[in-house]
Amino acid sequence: MLPQNNIACYIPPSDQEEPLRRLERRYAVLLFALGIGIYFLVNVHRVAVPGQLFNELQRDFSMSASAVANLGSVFMYIYAATQLLVGLLVDKYGGMRVLAAGSTALSLGALLFPLAQSVPMLLCSRMLVGLGCGAAYLCLIKETDRLFSRNFAAVTGLVIFLGYSGGVVGTMPLVKLTALIGWRACLMTLAISGILIQLAMMA
């Protein structure tokens, strides 16, 4: 007969552990879906300015063609520069936390841009948009690996498809909406949509 201290004791798992794990996963997947919504808006913002709104911005702010093009350039400079920083932050803090912080910058910049009354304000708000947009892709890739590691390639393809659909919406549909309600109201609608998604992520 084995000594008492060598007998392995079986401790059955709590009946609540499995439901809690399922609930946590559902919550994580919901946050992931909201993150895809942010990525959709990122791609709308990426193609909308200055491309689709070039004439409107040049007319309303009496800007030269190169000055309007600078709005696109400053976005891409900030977007590219954030990739190294976002990669480090995602590994340390996780994808959804970094995405939540990035979406704050995106929402603020997107809100300020249609309210801008000067070219420097346009540039500053566009820099904030670039900073926020730069967080989206890497954060979603990190969360895809964490939540869907067995179907990583398929889910990544779905994320890219849904995100790039925003780029499609940011072309002709955005031009048509701008013709109906004006570019400021159009971009304000995008900003409010982003804020609502962000609030849902924080709820």
Image (cartoon, helix red, strand yellow):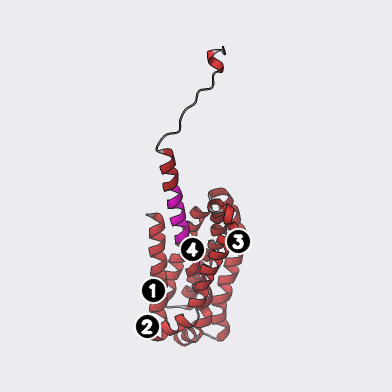
Drawn side of residue 183 relative to residue 123, left or right: left
Q: Kindly report the secondary structure that dominates the magenta region of the rendered protein.
A: helix
Q: Report the residue at 60% width, 53% height from top.
A: 88
Q: Position of residue 31 (x, y in %)?
A: 45, 56
Q: Residue under circle 4?
A: 36
Q: Position of residue 19 (x, y in %)?
A: 41, 43
Q: Report the residue at 48% width, 77% height from top.
A: 169
- Measured in 3D between alpha carbons, the distance from the residue under mark 1 to the one under mark 4, in whole angstroms, is 18 Å
State if disc 2 and disc 1 touch (CB < 8 Å): yes
Question: Looking at the rendering, in which quadrant would you find the C terminus?
Answer: bottom left
- Amino acid type of the residue tagged 2 in the rendering: Ile
User: Is 8 in front, or is 161?
Assistant: 8
State if disc 3 and disc 2 touch (CB < 8 Å): no
Element assignment for label 2? helix
- Measured in 3D between alpha carbons, the distance from the residue under mark 1 to the one under mark 2, in whole angstroms, is 10 Å
Q: Residue under circle 3?
A: 83
Q: Position of residue 177 (x, y in %)?
A: 41, 82
Query: Does residue 89 appear anywhere in the picture?
Result: no
Q: Which mark is residue 189?
A: 1
- Measured in 3D between alpha carbons, the distance from the residue under mark 3 to the one under mark 4, in whole angstroms, is 18 Å
User: Is 129 in front, or is 35?
Assistant: 35
Query: Crowding near pointer 3: few (<14 within 10 Å), some, many (20+)?
Result: some
Q: Report the residue at 51% width, 77% height from top.
A: 168
Q: Residue under circle 2?
A: 181
Provide the residue span drawn in magenta: 24-39
Quarter assignment of residue 161: bottom right
- Amino acid type of the residue tagged 4 in the rendering: Ile
25 w.r.t. 170: above or below? above
146 w.r.t. 20: above or below? below
From the viewer's perspective, is the residue at label 3 or at label 4 nearer? 4
